[in-house]
């Protein structure tokens, strides 16, 4: 009995001790939620229930919870409730509230060493803003762990806007959003030159829109409508749906708008509603959690199975889960795994009741160990993977970027465009070109100004609509064919490009765009800073430079174009050289007479020397043979000189007769600015006018050339030299002395298509701006058009369009300052008029000389015997007589020298005795014929005499230098012969003019070879 009683007592005592131990080992977690987030409490309790049913994690241990609801904007209430939870004895504190209350709880957790797992919750579902840092005591540990990752919305939206290449857009945010959360984004957009407008969306959206229509003017409302074409929305899904619905119903946006909504809390239901309510293109950025597609893998995480209502994507409850709900579930799962590891390590520290009111209250001793265990391990759950870094933040966050196409169709499909995470950044390509495939049916109103060859219009025949053509029209048509839109063209009412008026308004084409009467402006429109401040421009589709149109000088007729290859001084030098070389050749032959062949009729007189030098210069040869070495050396050098001169003349003459080489004084803009004789100007108040004025007046970019041009253009206030339209300037150039400064491309086309080819152009080689397509300020078409223009340039289509209007094989020479013919370059009579004049002058001079010679011959012929006294000569009898004389005495003739004796009439007349002797021996009876033999002698001064045998009556007159009884003709004589005869040794008898008869043997007998000796001959 005693034993039984003892056993029962032991059992009771052990049971009480076990209950005490069980009571101490219960895991107690405290939670503080925002009073508006009842769903957080529901998920929190569901998570605790799931874990209490899982014996693999906590085994026999169970989790107990204490939950309190507070006002998210009341930090004092949050601290009070947290102290109450600590007084109950909790191991960890879970909170899902805003930043204002979370800062107070963070300070309390640090003081009490209670691990605080904070899940940031934004008010009313607006996008999160980073919580301001909380001041902490130096050296203390941070017991607050940020369950939700840091806010990366600034980084994501900056990446998306940059990928879309937006430069101008408006940013809307709702009244609950903390604008301080996007300060970094606004700073970065400002640094990159983006034009970003901010507007707060009030809670009563209808009233806000109504007030806007009531207070804005029509022009301001049009500009605001254009601004809405590109917008970023930082607001809750509910506010975004209400705002989109209102602006669509009030027709503030069209199907070509593109809006971006960024918010981590966008559910699938919200996504579908937003797409249904919006038109145009919609891009949504939201947080996503990578999950396996298999439901079993999604719900089973390691040693825990998640409730199916939360992990199955087909379950309606799972589809409506908020992000904070997911993080609350994973937080409870992480704490359960932490408690499991603490129990296994047997380092459990029982939870004592803490009081945060008493001053002497000590923090929990096991808090540090519990905090380190939570930060050391992670867990897989509804948020993919939850873990903490050393600084207590969750690094795992992923964004998905969803988008629709442009269009008005309700319920358009949504597709994933890209993803983003802090480690890899943007994964995918974002382009704003989806509009290209869905612009069919769009009609753009295009305003233009006629400007050849950019925009031209054909005549309206029989009521048909005007047909526009030109380079800019071709570019617009290429864009239309690719993008699918249609267009209507009309001309600006005042036919001007437009400029800023004194009242601050724009006129012309620019005014049509500013006042929203046109969608697109197209012509020879250059991109300038002033224009770009009020309208948008596409990328340049053609380079622009300033040029000047000038009239070509009339081509003058040069009768002596054949003399153009050489300068007058060179012609004078050549003529002087001919005279000088002729004189030198004559002197060389006079100093060293040449050996003339038998029967030669030439002589080395000054006249013949001049004629020979001239003949060789014009490559026609000469008649006088020169055999001396000095003369041949001189003639060789002269022929080389003549060859070079004639070749150079021939080549240069061909160039001068086929290519006009007349240079004009104006060959560049610098030349134009330096001269003042030719007036020039441009179109008043045009882009060229403003450019010249800016570069002349602006001290930061002052150019001396433009300063000089501005003085001419602005003479008398610009009234004299400037015109109202470009056509007027072209007419002034054609029919007067004027230079028209305008777009170089336009001027080149005008010069190319002029019927008379009477224009030429001068322009800058380096373009400083370009032609672009103008659009309304904030137009969504700019980026799309610019992209297509770049594609046209890359694939060569733009060059093909240019060649259509600026062909390379132009019929006119754009850069020649005189009129030239390009068809064959045939020579005309004007080019050779001088040659014919020289020929005519030579013919006239020859006739005059012939007349003078004829007169002189008649006058001189009256002094000689009549022709009746002359008798005909039997040349055959003369040949036989000469041959018989040669055969009478053979031996003396064999000793004849190769020299010759030159006799002149002057020499013969100077020696009466010798003349008498010659006349006696040379007189053929009854014939009046005189004969003599020439024996050349290569000496300059030599005394010559007739042989004794010849003086005795030797009928042939031969002299011998050998034996045979003949005396040496060089020693025996009547007197010296000091010079050659001017006629080459011939002299004329008083009765009959002599003739040259070569020696030819006519019969058998001794052959002396005289006929083969070129140095011998007989003159008669």
Image (spheres, helix red, strand yellow):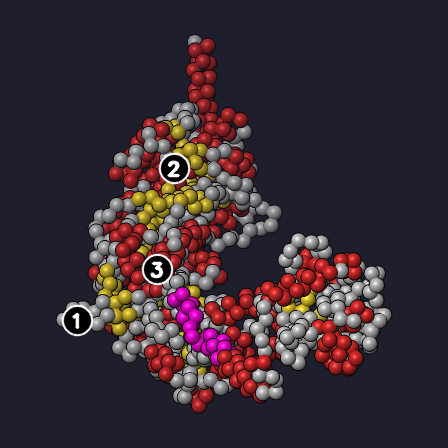
Residue 630 image offset from top left, x and y in percent: 75, 66
Identify the residue position indicated by label 3 in the image: 801
Along the horizontal axis of the image, is 437 left or right of 593?
A: left
- Which mark is first along the chain, 2 or 3? 2
Q: Are marks 1 and 3 in contact (CB under 8 Å)?
A: no
Residue at mark 3 to residue at mark 2: CA–CA distance: 51 Å
Question: Which numbered dot is residue 290?
Answer: 2
Whether residue 27 appears in this view of the structure is no
Which residue is drawn at the image coordinates 39% and 81% (left, top)? 733
What range of the chain is rendered magenta?
817-840
Mark nearer the viewer, 2 or 1: 1
> Callout 2 environment at 10 Å: few (<14), some (14 to 19), or many (20+)?
few
Question: Which numbered dot is residue 461?
Answer: 1
- Which mark is first along the chain, 1 or 2? 2
Residue 778 sits in quarter: bottom left
Residue 328 sits in quarter: top left
> Is 475 inside the magenta-drawn segment?
no
Residue 159 image offset from top left, x and y in percent: 43, 52
Residue 306 image offset from top left, x and y in percent: 35, 31
Check the image and report above or below for 886 versus 125.
Answer: below
């Amino acid at each position: 009995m005693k034993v039984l009683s003892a056993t029962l007592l032991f059992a009771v005592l052990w049971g009480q001790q076990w209950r005490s131990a069980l009571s101490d080992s219960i895991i107690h977690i405290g939670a503080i939620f925002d009073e508006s987030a009842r769903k957080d409490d529901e998920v929190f309790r569901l998570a605790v229930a799931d874990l209490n049913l899982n014996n693999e994690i906590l085994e026999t241990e169970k989790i107990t919870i204490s939950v309190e609801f507070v006002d998210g904007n009341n930090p004092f209430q949050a601290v009070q409730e947290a102290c109450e939870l600590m007084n109950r004895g909790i191991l960890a504190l879970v909170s899902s509230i805003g930043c204002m209350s979370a800062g107070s709880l963070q300070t309390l957790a640090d003081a009490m060493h209670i691990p605080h797992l904070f899940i940031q919750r934004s008010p009313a579902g607006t996008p999160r803003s980073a919580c301001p840092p909380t001041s902490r005591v130096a050296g203390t540990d941070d017991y607050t762990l940020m369950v939700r990752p840091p806010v990366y919305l600034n980084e994501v939206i900056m990446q998306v806007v940059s990928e879309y290449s937006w430069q101008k857009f408006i940013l809307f945010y709702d009244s609950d959003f903390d604008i301080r959360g996007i300060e970094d984004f606004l700073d970065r957009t400002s640094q990159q030159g983006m034009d970003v407008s901010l507007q707060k969306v009030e809670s009563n959206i209808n009233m806000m829109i109504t007030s806007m229509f009531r207070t804005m003017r029509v022009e301001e409302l049009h500009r605001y409508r254009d601004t809405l074409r590109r917008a970023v929305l930082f607001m809750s899904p509910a506010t975004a749906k209400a705002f989109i619905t209102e602006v669509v119903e009030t027709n503030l946006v069209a199907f070509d708008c593109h809006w971006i909504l960024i918010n981590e809390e966008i559910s699938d239901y919200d996504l579908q509603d937003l797409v249904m309510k919006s038109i145009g293109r919609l891009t949504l950025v939201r947080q996503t959690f990578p999950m396996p597609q298999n439901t079993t893998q999604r719900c089973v995480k390691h040693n825990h199975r998640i409730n199916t209502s939360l992990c199955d994507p087909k379950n309606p409850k799972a589809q409506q889960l908020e992000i904070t709900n997911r993080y609350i579930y994973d937080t409870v799962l992480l704490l359960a795994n932490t408690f499991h590891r603490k129990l296994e390590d047997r380092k459990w520290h029982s939870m004592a009741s803490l009081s945060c009111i008493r001053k002497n209250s000590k923090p929990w001793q096991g808090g540090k160990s519990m905090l380190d265990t939570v930060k050391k391990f992670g867990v897989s759950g509804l948020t993919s993977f939850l873990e903490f870094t050393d600084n207590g933040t969750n690094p795992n966050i992923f964004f998905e970027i969803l988008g629709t196409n442009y269009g008005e169709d309700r319920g358009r499909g949504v597709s994933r465009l890209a993803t983003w995470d802090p480690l890899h950044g943007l994964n995918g390509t974002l382009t704003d070109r989806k509009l290209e495939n869905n612009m069919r049916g769009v009609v753009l109103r295009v305003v233009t100004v006629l400007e050849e060859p950019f925009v031209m219009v054909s005549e309206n025949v029989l009521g048909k609509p005007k047909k526009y053509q030109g380079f800019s029209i071709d570019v617009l048509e290429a864009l239309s064919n690719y993008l699918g839109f249609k267009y209507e063209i009309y001309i600006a009412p005042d036919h001007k490009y437009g400029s800023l008026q004194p009242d601050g308004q724009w006129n012309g084409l620019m005014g049509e765009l500013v006042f929203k009467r046109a969608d697109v402006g197209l012509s020879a429109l250059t991109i300038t800073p002033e224009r770009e401040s009020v309208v948008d421009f596409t990328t340049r589709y053609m380079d622009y430079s300033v040029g000047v149109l000038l009239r070509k000088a009339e081509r003058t007729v040069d009768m002596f174009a054949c003399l153009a290859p050489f300068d007058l001084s060179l012609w004078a030098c050549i003529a002087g050289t001919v005279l000088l070389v002729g004189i030198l050749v004559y002197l060389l032959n006079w100093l060293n007479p040449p050996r003339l062949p038998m029967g030669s009729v030439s002589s080395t007189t000054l006249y013949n020397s001049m004629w020979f030098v001239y003949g060789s210069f014009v490559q026609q040869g000469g008649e006088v043979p020169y055999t001396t070495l000095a003369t041949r050396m001189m003639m060789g050098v002269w022929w080389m000189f003549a060859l070079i001169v004639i070749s150079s003349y021939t080549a240069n003459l061909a160039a001068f007769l086929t290519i006009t080489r007349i240079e004009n004084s104006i060959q560049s803009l610098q030349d134009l600015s330096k001269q003042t004789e030719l007036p020039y100007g441009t179109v008043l108040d045009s882009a060229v006018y403003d450019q010249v004025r800016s570069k002349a007046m602006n001290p930061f970019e002052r150019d001396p050339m433009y300063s000089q041009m501005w003085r001419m253009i602005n003479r008398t206030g610009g009234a004299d030299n400037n015109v109202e339209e470009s056509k007027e300037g072209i007419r002034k150039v054609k029919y007067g002395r004027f230079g028209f400064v305008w777009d170089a491309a336009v001027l080149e086309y005008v010069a190319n298509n002029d019927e008379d080819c009477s224009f030429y152009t001068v322009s800058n080689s380096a373009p400083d701006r370009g032609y672009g397509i103008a659009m309304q300020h904030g137009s969504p078409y700019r980026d799309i058009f610019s992209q297509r223009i770049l594609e046209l340039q890359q694939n060569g289509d733009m060059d093909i369009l240019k060649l259509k209007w600026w062909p390379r094989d132009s019929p006119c020479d754009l850069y020649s300052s005189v009129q030239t013919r390009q068809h064959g370059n045939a020579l005309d009579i004007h080019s050779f008029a001088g040659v014919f004049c020289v020929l005519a002058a030579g013919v006239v001079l020859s006739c005059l000389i012939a007349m003078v010679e004829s007169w002189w011959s008649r006058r001189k012929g009256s002094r000689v015997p009549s022709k009746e006294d002359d008798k005909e000569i039997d040349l055959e009898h003369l040949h036989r007589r000469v041959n018989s004389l040669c055969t009478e005495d053979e031996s003396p003739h064999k000793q004849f020298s190769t020299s010759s004796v030159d006799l002149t009439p002057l020499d013969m007349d100077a020696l009466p005795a010798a003349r008498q002797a010659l006349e006696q021996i040379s007189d053929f009876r009854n014939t009046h014929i005189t004969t003599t033999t020439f024996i050349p002698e290569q000496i300059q001064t030599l005394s010559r005499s007739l042989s004794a045998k010849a003086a005795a009556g030797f009928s042939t007159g031969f002299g011998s230098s050998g034996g045979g009884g003949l005396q040496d003709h060089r020693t025996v004589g009547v007197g010296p012969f000091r010079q050659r005869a001017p006629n080459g040794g011939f002299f004329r008898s008083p009765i009959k003019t002599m003739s040259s008869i070569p020696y030819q043997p006519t019969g058998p007998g001794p052959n002396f070879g005289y006929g083969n000796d070129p140095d011998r001959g007989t003159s008669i």
